[in-house]
Image (cartoon, grey):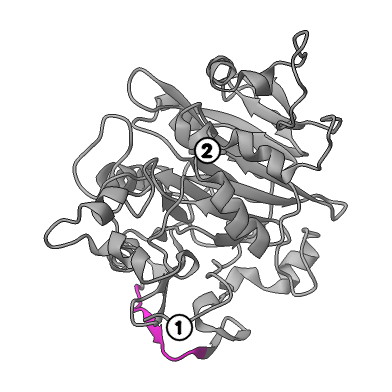
Amino acid sequence: MPVASSSPPILPAVSASSHSRSLRSGTLITGYTEQGHYTEATCTKEQPTKPLLVRGAHASYKYSQCSLALPLRHLSIKSSEMESGNLAENGHCSDAAGEPRSSLILLGTGCSSVVPNAMCLIQPSDPPCNVCFQSLSLPPERNPNYRCNTSLLIDYCQNNGEHKYILIDVGKTFREQVIRWFTFYKIPQVDSIILTHEHADAVLGLDDMRAVQPFSPTNDISPTPVYLSQYAMESIATKFPYLVKKKLKEGQELRRVAQLDWKIIESNHEKPFVASGLQFVPLPVMHGEDYLCLGFLFGEKCKVAYISDISRFPSSTEYVISKNGGGQLDLLILDTLYKKGSHNTHFCFPQTLEAVKRICPKRALLVGMTHEFDHHKDNETLMEWSRREGIPVQLAHDGLRVPIDL
């Protein structure tokens, strides 16, 4: 059984100084194994290395002039281009140790039906689903196979040192994510919301936004801006009319509801918008051939593409992501639903890995997984793929924090 921990694993920081690094090399941290070992590999196409296994409840690990002694399951390793001097010299928003103050927190990494799948528990198969049954013996914070609806929180440190919290998607499991990860990472509020589309796993938590807003019996508070497409706006107006309408009808009682300020954005990469001081470029993608969904490109120092629901890249969108050739994208966060075959509304493992090869980011994290994926075993498979292709790729998990220069 994995060693108990008060903190989830943290990926190595992503910094702008990594632009000087060879295009197809990087560091892959695959997480911890079922035996409680921590696996790490330096991924270089020309000189692949074997994973290092660190054993025991605590580990002291020296890597690239950075010595760490941390509880095993939240071991954090800085890659060679992450030395504090580089960050300080570039004037980035970093702390005294050179760690970027901005970060990405993956609040959820699962599909719409989440993991564990309820049917696996109430009508177990023979043999039973090991991934889902793991939830009966391990608490969620110690179980990387426990996956809520896909959602990303951007902790953006502005130049003046003030933090802004930008939430992408507010799905069915939003309340659980707040209780688990907002409290753990001490997130005090949500400053902006961005919606990829209007499906249940992206919007049905909007009502619970009132729980993270200041209390006012008269609803006299500053509304949280919500950035979304016109199509999503029209759909949400039918799902949550009380969150959209501003005036009460005669005789209608005042009730406390989330105060939201709806802002329509264009589904066009030539129409960027700014949320809480950070610029976002919409990335229209197909989520089934009859449905347009949005991903987003953001970050000035390090560029991140977040695409949680996709079945096909329009050529213009893929060009924007890969603009001026490979190596421009520091981090790609990409949808993958099933391990084999294909799906009409989502990428599956084969399509996801082909897209990663085409786009050639410096690092990729996969989200949106069903219970077909076992975090430990499939990250071992991805370690081999990463060595072979020279692109570090791994399955993300709920609560994963990625320090990054934005």
Q: Is residue 87 left or right of residue 39?
A: right
| Residue 4 appears anywhere in the view | yes
Prevailing secondary structure class for the magenta stretch in the rendered image: loop
Q: Is residue 52 magenta?
A: yes
Residue 405 in the image: x percent, y percent? 68, 56
Q: Quadrant of residue 113?
A: top left
**Picture residue at 45% right of the left edge, 68% below the top:** 139
- Whether residue 372 is visible, yes or no, is no
Instruction: Please determine whether, in this image, residue 59 is positioned above or below residue 326.
Output: below
| Residue tagged 1 | 3
Residue 141 vertical placement versus 309 (above, below)? below
Q: Nearer the viewer, residue 326 or 200?
A: 200
Other residues around mark 2 within 10 Å, as few (<14) / some (14–19) / many (≥20): few
Q: Determine the secondary structure under disc 1.
A: loop
Tell me which numbered mark, 1 or 2, is placed earlier along the sequence. Answer: 1
Range of magenta residues: 48-58
In front: mark 1 or mark 2?
1
Q: Residue furthest left?
A: 126
* Residue occupying image coordinates x 58% and y 47%: 175
Left or right: where 320 falls relative to 67: left
> Residue at (84%, 51%) from the top-left corner?
159
How far across and how far down the image is residue 295, in percent? 51, 34
Q: Are marks 1 and 2 in contact (CB under 8 Å)?
A: no
Residue furthest toward the top?
A: 250
Q: Position of residue 240 (x, y in %)?
A: 59, 22
Pinpoint residue 392: horizontal percent, then vertical percent: 42, 61
Residue 61's disc number: none
